[in-house]
Amino acid sequence: MFSLSITPRFYETDAFGHINNTVIAGWFEAGRAPIFQIFTPDMDIKNLTLILARIEVDFVAQTHYGHDVVVKTGIEKVGNSSFVVIQEAWQNDALVAKGKAVQVYFDFKTQKSDRIPDIHRVQLEALI
């Protein structure tokens, strides 16, 4: 499982003093960067072969400004052309959000999904 520490920024707060709910999805995307690097080690986005098909976020507790958040990222399952990323956000040793993202291995030339290459499949399955 990958781990990313994030320091919430003041502008990410809402009128109630909480971290705005839209921010968590962005933090989860940042937490998926090591997964993207499995497919594109140099992170040249022109060569990235993944698209996002679905995200879901469950807000478990309030997230506040002034305390770092740790985003944990792993893999739930690997299919033929897609895989499910699982993620959690923790603040002050408490789970504040959890979610899933479905990533699809995609051929931009044919505009269709494609089978995940075995070399990448092995790396993903090691994260289950």
Image (cartoon, rainbow, N blue to C red):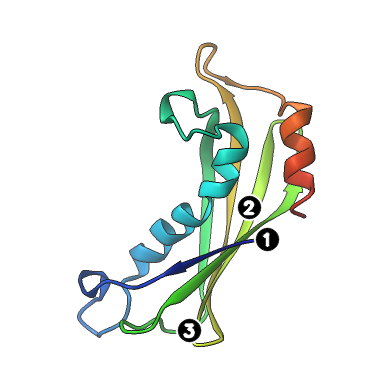
Q: Is residue 5 above or below residue 47?
A: below
Disc 1 to disc 2, C-alpha distance: 10 Å
**Amino acid at circle 2:** Val
Q: Residue at x 20, y 70 (%)?
A: 11
Residue beneath label 2, please? 85
The quarter holding residue 104 reads top right
Q: Quadrant of the C terminus?
A: bottom right
Q: CA distance from mark 1 to mark 3?
A: 22 Å
Question: Which of the pair 107/44 is nearer the observer?
Answer: 44
Which tag, 1 or 2, sits closer to the chain's start? Answer: 1
The percent position of residue 117, horizontal first and vertical second, equals: 73, 26
Residue 36 % position (x, y)? 55, 41
Q: Secondary structure at mark 1?
A: loop
Percent x, y of residue 4:
51, 64
Neighbour tally class for label 2: few under 14, some 14-19, many 20 plus, Cα within 10 Å = many
Where, by quadrant of the figure, is residue 93 drawn?
Answer: bottom right
- Secondary-structure class at tag 2: strand
**Relative height, residue 86 to residue 54 (above, below):** below
Q: Which mark is residue 61?
A: 3
Residue under the image location 50 percent in, 18 percent down:
108
Closest to the observer: 90 or 98? 90
Q: Residue furthest front?
A: 42
Residue 78 in sight here: no
Q: Quadrant of the N terminus?
A: bottom right
Q: Judge left or right: residue 44 versus residue 78.
A: left
The answer to whether residue 97 is seen in the rendering is yes
Determine crowd level at label 1: few under 14, some 14-19, many 20+ residues with C-alpha closer than 10 A.
Answer: few
Give the mark, 1 or 3, whose residue is nearer the N terminus: 1
Residue ID for mark 1? 1
The residue at 41%/78% (across/down) is: 68
